[in-house]
Every structure is written in C-alpha cells, then in structure tokens.
Amino acid sequence: MTSKVTSGTVSVTVSAAVAISASPFVPAPDPAPAPTAAPSAAIHNEIRIPHEARKIGNTPQRLKGRLIEIKGGPIECASENPELAGSLTRDIAKSLKNRDSRAAMVLYDRTTRTSCTYRADKHYDSASIVKPIILGALLLARRTHLSEDERDLAREMIVHSDNDATYTLWDRLGPEKIQKFLDRAGMKNTTLDEAGFMGLTQVTARDQAKLLELLTGDDNSVLDADERGYILDLMHDVQKDQRWGTPAGAPSDAAVQVKNGWLQRSESGLKNPWDRGDWKVNSMSAFTNHAYDYGLVVLTENNRVPESESPDVGWDYGMATIEGVAKAVHHNLYPDRIPVAAGSPGRT
C-alpha cells in the first residue's frame, strides 16, 4: 500500500522508500503571515512585460556562441555580445567547478538576446517547482473564472508552498487537464508521476524555462495576459524565507518572480534526524520591471549529507550551488546594477 506523505514542498510514496522534508531541523522562520485574499487576475504594475517580448529559444545564427566542457557536459552560451557569451560561460563553469551537485541550468535574456544551457534536457524530480504548472492547468481549465476557494488554494500553493492546497487542486484537475496544459505550453519533456505524487514529476531545466518564457511573453494562445499576470503576481509574493536560490545577486530594482522546491530521497526510508539521503534542490525565477526581461532555472541533485552532519547540510549545499550559478549570471548580465542586499532573498 502506498500513501501520500506531505511535508513542506513535496509529496512522495512511503513504499518507495523516499524521505522528504521541506526545511528539516532548521530553526523555524517567523510564522507565515495569515492568508489574505488572492489578488485579482490583473497584471501587477511592476511586473508588466514589454509587448515586444519574444522567445529566443531558437538562437539565430548571428548570435555568437561559446562552449566550455566540464565534468557533467558542455556549458553553452550564445549572445549578440561575444564577450558576454564568453564571460557567462567561463563564470558559470567556475561556479560549478568542484561542486558535488549534479546541476542543470537554462538562462534566457530577451533584453541582451543571450541564452545559456547546461544539461538542459536531463530529468530531475520537480519538488515544488511543479506548482506553477498546476496553477497554469487550473487557469487553462477555468480561465479567470476561479472560485474564491480556488483563489485561496492557489495562493496557499504558490506563496506558502502548501502541499495540502496543491493536492486539492491536483485532484480536482486530474492528470488529463494538467497534461493538456503541458502539451499546450510545449513542455514535451515533463512527465507526471504515474502514482500521482506531484513532487516526483520529472522536469527539465529547458521545459521550466519554457514556462517562464510563456508567463513573461505576449503569446495569448495558452493563457491570456491576465492569467499569466495572475501566476506572476503570486510568484512575486512568495514568502520571504522561500526567496533563496536564483534571486541571489539579482539587480535590486528588478521585480523577482520565484518558485523553489526541495526534497530528500533516501533508499532506506525516512530516518529522523540523520537521514543520509541526497537532496534535490531546485529554483526558478523570472526577472522583470524596467528593462529586465530574463529568466533562470537551476536544478540540482546529489547534494549529499556527510556522516555525523545535520541533514540540513545537504539542502544548504544544493542552495549554495544554485546561488553560485545565479550570482555569476546576474553579475555578467548587469554588472553595473546594485545587487540585492546579501541575505534578502535567502532563507531566514
């Protein structure tokens, strides 16, 4: 028999000997604010996206590319600015050097017409970065005609990463409607868990970047502007202690829409508090406002917990891997901008 187990941002089967925890054995952050009424579906003023925004997934020939081979495969960057492509490739490679994390990443920047990929099509457990997909499926099915209850559940799912709210929406939609959204969004390499455990959805960095491009673009064929803005508003409001990862080092005047996920999978089941299972730690963000129009996805696994160390060491290791990549990206894209103050987007 299997059963859904929820803790923090993920859900897994007990019989599969999978252990999970959102922020185990870490001093509790300040209590989350009481849920408030969900925002209207109108786009938040400070995250309105330029009308001329467009995808850059198929890099035009005129963009200059750079490639550096590291132990996990090639890091490839392309840009209209060859020096930017070169520095990004070099600094991303440097950030991943000597890291035990198995990472994957995708960057797109419409403003500078720059993109980077590393292991972009490798599958990873989604943990909670599947939640914007679920909200996208809900809006595709209901359009903006969400009930008050659905808006409350959506806010709990995205802003507070509540698993109970997520499973309520997951079960109401069913896999067919979620798959319909994935198909419409062109997320062909995302696979829902057959047993129905949302956190074990198999995602790729490329597909998650496609989702960010969809949400921040001007294509109304999947979701209209109000629906896309509604998702971005909730990601913009993610509670403070869950704003670590890809926002690290971002320009302070950028609007940040973020969703993170983390889970621990063990071959020996749940062992509290010294589980040696590795951590899967993921982060995705869209950066908008002013002239910013870029997105970054970083996925990690194999964030191990050394013997005699607290289990949160593995989570911290994965988060540090992500933030190293993020800081390299933000600094190279916008070196003259003031970065977010240290610790502001991080775990409290």
Image (cartoon, helix red, strand yellow):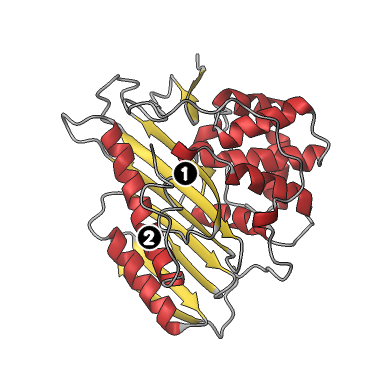
Residue 264, percent from left and from top: 37, 32
What residue is shown at x 42% (from left), y 65% (from top)? 329
Residue 267, percent from left and from top: 32, 28
Q: Which residue is mark 2?
A: 327
Residue type at tag 1: Arg
In whole angstroms, how far apart are the C-alphas of marks 2 and 1?
A: 14 Å
What residue is shown at x 50% (from left), y 17% (from top)? 2
Q: Residue furthest left?
A: 308
218 above or below 60?
above
* Residue 206's disc number: none
Closest to the observer, 18 or 231: 231
Residue 144, percent from left and from top: 81, 41
269 above or below 97?
above
N-terminal label among 2 and 1: 1
Q: Residue furthest top?
A: 1
234 above or below 156?
below
189 left or right of 119?
Answer: right
Residue type at tag 2: Lys
Any part of residue 189 in sight: yes
Q: Which residue is mark 1?
A: 243
Quarter holding residue 310 = top left
183 left or right of 126?
Answer: right
The local crowd at label 1, few if under 14, some if 14 to 19, many if 20 or more residues have their Cα within 10 Å, is many
Mark 1, secondary structure of its residue = loop
Quarter holding residue 163 = top right
Closest to the observer, 12 or 166: 166
Mark 2, secondary structure of its residue = helix
**Quadrant where the C terminus is found in the figure:** top left
Residue 326, percent from left and from top: 40, 58
Any part of residue 261 in sight: no
